[in-house]
Image (cartoon, grey):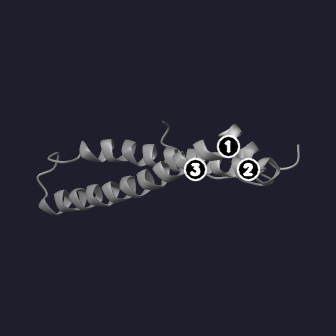
Amino acid sequence: MSKKKPELDIDNYSVAKLVTELHEYFQNSQAYYEVIQGETRKQIGASDNIEKEREVTEEMKLLAQKISFFGALNDVLSAADRLVHAQGIVSDMGLNEDLYGKQ
């Protein structure tokens, strides 16, 4: 995972493609903040400055919240991604065009 913050570009996407892109976006965002958290963790105990230690501790708490947030969204979109790509179910319900667009 790179340290580049993920971006979402969704022009002209079908519902299925949008769900897949959102899933990947949230998955990549979670991984991005995990990398940042790992780098921030290295700063703990690296300074004798009490204020700096407090700042690092607060940053770690915020990163944990972001990871949890994006992790939950990743989990939800993972389930949605599996469902919209379950061709048999989608075909049986006649939702091909609704989810995949005109083909």
Residue appearing at x 12%, y 60% in the figure: 50
Circle 2 or circle 3, nearest the eye: 2
Q: Secondary structure at mark 3?
A: helix
State the image coordinates of residue 73 (x, y, percent, origin top left): 48, 55
Residue sitting at the far front = 92
What amino acid type should be assigned to the residue bearing mark 2?
Answer: Met
- The reply to whether discs 1 and 2 touch (Cβ–Cβ < 8 Å) is yes
Q: Secondary structure at mark 2?
A: loop
Q: How many marks can you see? A: 3
Which image quarter: residue 39? top left
Please give the residue where the numbered disc 2 appears in the rendered image: 93
What amino acid type should be assigned to the residue bearing mark 3?
Answer: Ala
State whether residue 84 appears in this view: yes
Please give the residue where the numbered disc 3 appears in the rendered image: 80
Which image quarter: residue 65? bottom left
Left or right side of 41 for 2: right
Query: Where does the C terminus fall, quadrant-wise?
Result: top right
Q: Residue 9: which disc? A: none
Which image quarter: residue 69? bottom left
Local crowd at mark 3 within 10 Å, few (<14), some, or many (≥20)? some
Please give the residue where the numbered disc 1 appears in the rendered image: 89
Residue appearing at x 88%, y 48% in the figure: 102
Q: Nearer the viewer, residue 61 or 14?
A: 14
Residue appearing at x 70%, y 38% in the figure: 88
Give how far apart the Cα atoms at labels 1 and 3 are.
Answer: 13 Å
